Amino acid sequence: MPLTALLSALFAGLVAIGATLAIERWGGRLGGVLGSIPTTIVPASLGIAAGSASTAEYQQAMLAVPAGMLLNAGYLLLWRLLPPLLPPSAPRLPLVLGGALLGWLAGAVLVVLSGSIWTQARLPLLPLAMLTTLAILALGLRACLQPWPAPKGLRHVGPLTLLARGALAALAVGGAVLIASTGHPLLAGLASVFPAIFTTTMVSLWISQGEAVPTGAVGPMMLGSASVAVYALAASVLVPALGPLAGNGLAWLCAALGLSLPAAIWLTRRGISPSPPLQPQVPRT
């Protein structure tokens, strides 16, 4: 089992780096959606499937993912809501990062407690997960309808930052696989979508590009993150029916073609092309 967790973590770390590069290349709007295509959840799903004692445990872990992605949508929204509340002289990045993480942790505690009550009552998880996915989609659409500057980055994110981002994503996925082997599927589902990727994306872009680039990507990243919830819903049904490889592959296609691609086309056809790059600035941290 440690080997399964290690392999899943290594693969997750490699695929996680692409989102930062996508936002840097295509700007916050289009890059935010493309950077949210299901990536690290795929090795997490494979690892959880291998580590789960039963199909029911695997399905419970996957059906917990939409709740985790709803937390992540709220986490991203805090990156947009908190900066205007801070005075210019405040250490903005540490305060925004700390506030967003505290909000996520508080929400995670509520999700775990309510999820335990829900499962103990033997209530079906699938309808709740579907409603949660719709809520993520609604929040993402609302955030994208609000005009917000989303410039491309002027500076390249350094290799050390990209490596740190991949390492944090690997730790999150490896931890999720290990948790799945202990018989706690709800915790495994939440751990698999811990906002390690979003955190390292926002922090690295804030430091290297300035505040406007990551905050401009918030709405599209929220919208794009709904595709991870769609993937988890599809995987919970397809993996038990078709097996890990075919089931996860088809679930990824459902999410990418059913949500990520239409979202990118919608943003483009609304006339929301990436804003012109900002003038070089020294980011405030």
Image (tube, rainbow, N blue to C red):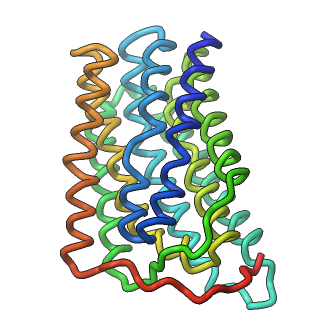
Q: Does 18 appear above or below 189?
A: below
Asked whether residue 128 is in view, the answer is no
Residue 249 lies left or right of residue 74; in this view the side is: left
Query: In which quarter of the view is residue 234 placed?
Result: top left
Q: Can you give x and y, in whole percent of width and height, for residue 89 in the image?
A: 81, 89
Image mark count: 0
Q: Nearer the viewer, residue 150 or 182?
A: 150
Residue at horizontal 52 percent and vertical 64 percent from the top: 76
Residue at horizontal 58 percent and vertical 70 percent from the top: 79
Q: Does 188 appear above or below 79?
A: above
Q: Nearer the viewer, residue 253 or 83?
A: 253
Residue at horizontal 45 percent and vertical 59 percent from the top: 22
Q: Nearer the viewer, residue 207 or 237?
A: 207
Q: Can you give x and y, in whole percent of width and height, for residue 32 in the image?
A: 42, 63
Residue at horizontal 20 percent and vertical 58 percent from the top: 262
Q: Can you give x and y, in whole percent of width and height, for residue 277 in the image?
A: 50, 83
* Image quadrant occupied by the C terminus: bottom right
Q: Does 31 appear above or below 7?
A: below
Q: Can you give x and y, in whole percent of width and height, for residue 49 in the image?
A: 43, 17
Asked whether residue 199 is in view, the answer is yes
Query: In which quarter of the view is residue 176 placed?
Result: top right
Q: Does 250 appear above or below 163?
A: above
* Image quadrant occupied by the N terminus: top right
Residue 249 lies left or right of residue 212; in this view the side is: left
